[in-house]
Amino acid sequence: MAFSKRTPVRANTTPVLDRNTKHSFWAALAKVIAVPMIPLLLLMWFGSPALRMSYRWNGDHQASVYSHCLYLNLMSGWEHVDPLYGVNNCPLITFFPFNIVNFIKG
């Protein structure tokens, strides 16, 4: 037998809605719009990142000249790059221009 006949206090699960609905609606709408737009704006500004997967080079290890680079692009898949002769222009990670129209069309 229990020493006390008190019943436990029921928890109040009703949300407190005393905020101003007008401000919370616009703030929530701004967040919903910003979540997809910020990465898209960054892609348009910097370009789509790509990782060098394979390359060909001429010469020795100290003075190598790249003749062919194959990149895996985040948005458009494989990108083939032939740098100018004499220019060591095949970095490990690079950015390619991002085309919003092709992105939307799929």
Image: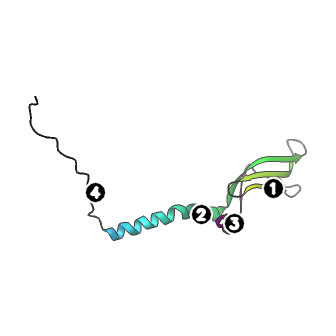
Position of the N terminus, as image quadrant, is top left
Q: Upstream in the sequence, badge 2 or badge 4?
A: 4
Is residue 84 placed above or below 20 in the rendered structure?
Answer: above
Query: 10 Å neighbourhood of mark 3: few (<14), some, or many (≥20)?
Result: few
Q: Nearer the viewer, mark 2 or mark 4?
A: 4
Residue denoted by label 2? 40
Residue type, label 2 = Leu
Residue type, label 3 = Asn
Whether tag 2 and tag 3 are in contact, CB under 8 A, the answer is: no
Cα separation, mark 1 vs mark 3, equals 18 Å
Question: Does the magenta segment cover residue 104?
Answer: yes
Q: Looking at the image, which residue sits at the far front?
A: 1
Residue denoted by label 1? 80
Q: Position of residue 106 (x, y in %)?
A: 67, 63
- Residue 99: which quarter of the image? bottom right
Q: Upstream in the sequence, badge 1 or badge 4?
A: 4
Residue denoted by label 4? 15
Q: Upstream in the sequence, badge 3 or badge 4?
A: 4
- Please report the bounds of the magenta region as a residue range: 89-106
Q: Under tag 4, what secondary structure? A: loop
Q: Nearer the viewer, mark 2 or mark 3?
A: 3
Cα separation, mark 1 vs mark 4, equals 56 Å
Q: Under tag 3, what secondary structure? A: helix
Picture residue at 54% right of the left edge, 62% below the top: 36
In front of the other: 105 or 71: 105
